[in-house]
Amino acid sequence: MSVEMMSIYGFITISIIFIMFIILMFEWVRAHIAFVSVVFILLLIGVLSPMEAISGFINQSVITVGALFVIITAIQRTSVVETLTSMISRSADNESKSTMKIMAIVSAMSSFLNNIPLVLLITPIVKKWSIAKNSYPSKFLISVSYAAILGGMCTLIGTSTNLLIHSMLVQNGYEGFSMFELALVGVPSAIAVILYMSIYGYRRLPEIHHEEKELPTQVKKLTMSGKEILIYVLFFSMLLSVSLQWISMAHGAMITCILFLILRVITIKEAFRSIPWPLLSIIGSALGIAVALEKSGAALMMTETFILPLSEYGPFPLLVAIYILASVVTEMITNNAAAALVFPIALYMTEQLGFNVEPYAIAIAIAASASFLTPFGYQTNLIVYEEGKYRFVDFMKAGLPVKIIVMCTTLYLIPLFWPLI
């Protein structure tokens, strides 16, 4: 593709994505329809090839999330749900203290556990608890997702985005992150957001009525304690293996899901019904859009427009520009896709200018995970978006202050702990 054609296709791609966000903001069509339609349009106009258009739908991220929903459906039928519900039920009666306790529990757990299965497990528990209290699940579920995102920022294994940036650093001859290095930025950001959400932020969340549902009608409660123990052993073995990086999340989820089916912990019919197909179509489409942003030259256009001019003013303006670019891109596509897209730009710029690459890598890791404005940039947001019956604008109202808090905290702390030059 020539430079001129890339410029044209880049502008068209950005325009299509912008129109999609307008459509989603006003909720003219369902989210999964909008995302799939954008991929189809990009295919029709030649930005994406047929293989590139479908590549996102057969990506391991889509398969992983589908498998995790099957696994969590089985776990929801065990006594662990009642145990965790009891823990949360001991929260204070008012929404402020309840929000603080829930976010503290979830963020601490997500520092060491993969946040997708964690949110899948916690979401129905918080729904059940809030309905039992005659409250609204929508007053808490966004906070659950935000807490999982924030906790994931605190350790190397907290989220796959951190591991991705770490591996890209190592591949380019750098040391990469230590286990708790990101906590220097992640922990203060998490504390600041939890305080904000528990003092004022929860007031910005909508009150959406939910019908109380114990479990899906097609799923029967488990009664055999032996089978419950088997479920726990398989599930925590998966989490341990993934956390220690013995296997990938995709392999762990698929192996566990297959074992659940073989051992008849869950039937094929129940498994099929537990999978949220619209959610998977959004994830698959977002991955295709990420390919279009890079291939069309849209990412290059954003670099030339925002990054290059600021780099002339020194290392800190470049840090701000890199953070903002990753922060904006992650709201349009998935967090990992945003990190993979922006890191090569930061690496090239820092090496050319003689800056230290590590603080810029940390900024990308935090910014790519800090997807609070839309339901689509982070998979935990998508989970609570569906379960909480939120609107697109609900995330914008709740997420803008959170995004600003994390950005200001990160950009203030990075130069204190990591030299920019």
Image (cartoon, rainbow, N blue to C red):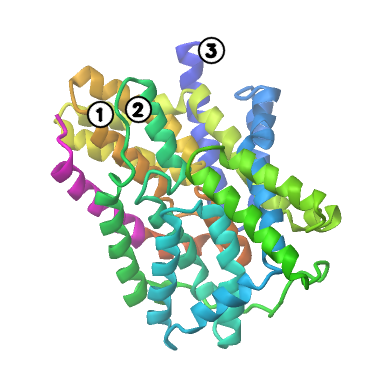
Estimate how packed mark 1 is, as few (under 14), some (14 to 19) or many (20 or more) residues with alpha carbons within 10 Å: many
Residue 249 among magenta residues: no
Residue depicted at x 82% and y 56%: 264
- In the visual, does 304 lie left or right of 254? left
Real-space Cα distance between discs 1 and 3?
30 Å
Instruction: Tell me residue 421's x, y (percent).
Output: 14, 29
Between disc 1 and disc 3, the foreground one is: 1
Can I make out residue 394 in this image?
yes
Residue 413 among magenta residues: yes
Kindly state the secondary structure of the residue where label 2 is placed. Answer: helix
Read off the residue under disc 3.
1
Residue depicted at x 51% and y 83%: 89
Read off the residue under disc 1.
357
User: Could you say which quadrant of the image residue 40 lies in?
Assistant: top right
Q: Which residues are magenta?
A: 401-421
- In the visual, does 232 lie left or right of 15? right
> Observer-nearest residue: 263 or 114?
263
Can I make out residue 390 in this image?
no
Q: Which amino acid type corresponds to the residue marked 2 in the rendered image?
A: Leu
> Observer-nearest residue: 136 or 223?
223
Estimate how packed mark 2 is, as few (under 14), some (14 to 19) or many (20 or more) residues with alpha carbons within 10 Å: many
Image marks 2 and 3: residues in contact by CB distance under 8 Å: no
Q: Which amino acid type corresponds to the residue marked 3 in the rendered image?
A: Met
Which sits earlier in the primary sequence, circle 2 or circle 1? 2
> Observer-nearest residue: 132 or 261?
261
Read off the residue under disc 2.
169
Image marks 2 and 1: residues in contact by CB distance under 8 Å: yes
Which sits earlier in the primary sequence, circle 2 or circle 3? 3
Real-space Cα distance between discs 2 and 3?
29 Å
